[in-house]
Image (cartoon, rainbow, N blue to C red):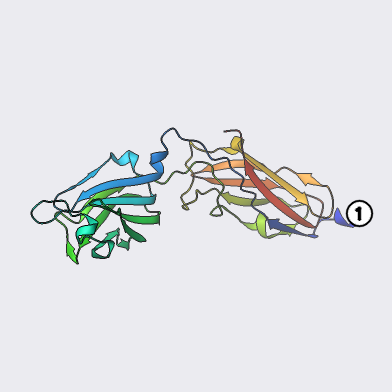
Amino acid sequence: RAGRAGRAGLVLAVVALLCVSFPVPVLADLADATTTCVVDSLGSPTCGPPTDQRAGEVIVSVLLKEASGVMCIDSNGCTAGTLAGTLGGVSADSVACTTGTAYCNLVWNSFTTSGSQQLAVTLGGAAVKDSPYTLVLAAADNGLTSSSQSDITGTGATGGAANTDLVFVFTLRDQYGNLVGTTTATCSDLTMVMSLASSSSQITPTCSHVGGGVFHGAFKTTVAGTWTISVSGGGL
């Protein structure tokens, strides 16, 4: 069998298996993962600088006031049912008022689009003062993290012939689907291994960084069979 496996022209089947065990970097400011913007129902919002606001989980805190300027406490008739909001045309996933306060939260669980977004807030079906607002979201945190968004494509991932040069494309994405930046990950941060299920054979593809979270893995083998591509990260 080994003799037959070395002959050119045999079909090489490749199975792409993502072992995305990328370490999650611990940031000093964990608040970067959440955008909090306070909107006064009678005035403009108070938000942090754009670099402190990221796509992902977005929370907009709304301070409710009566027309007279008096804070409207939920127990006095201000409830989550009278408040609504859209961000970039997408309705909030949930609305929750804090009992005993004049604050309610509009929450988007996974808002993946960065850049300038229109934030529209309504109270009792009417737009609050100065709405819609402009809210600027930086790109979601795209550090190395375990993510089912990453994928392997290309002829080298779907199969080919033994004794020929094959290439697969590995696209590294964060949990929101954003490409990992060129300064965040390089080939030295990734480990690419191919193994043959029927034996202990292993090969290491040659990695090249195309840029913007896209990598190429090149390999050639004389052994036909079903190979598994595993990509993991570490060393950050």
155 or 164, which is in the foreground? 155
Q: Residue at x 67, y 60 (%)?
A: 158
Q: List the residue tagged with mark 1.
A: 3
126 or 219, which is in the foreground? 126
- On the rendered structure, is 228 left or right of 171? right
Q: Residue at x 21, y 54 (%)?
A: 73
- In the displayed structure, 198 sits above or below 32; it is below
Rendered location of residue 112, percent (x, y): 40, 54
Rendered location of residue 33, percent (x, y): 41, 44
69 or 236, which is in the foreground? 69
- Badge 1 crowding class, 10 Å Cα cut-off, few under 14, some 14 to 19, many 20 or more, is few
Q: Quadrant of the C terminus?
A: top right
Rendered location of residue 71, percent (x, y): 16, 51
174 or 128, which is in the foreground? 128
- On the rendered structure, is 54 left or right of 18? left
- On the rendered structure, is 171 left or right of 97? right
Count of numbered marks: 1
Q: Residue furthest left?
A: 68
Tell me the amino acid under the disc marked 1: Gly
Rendered location of residue 75, percent (x, y): 23, 58
Q: Quadrant of the N terminus?
A: bottom right
Q: Residue furthest bottom?
A: 125
Q: Residue at x 72, y 53 (%)?
A: 228
Describe the element under mark 1 as helix, strand or loop. Answer: helix
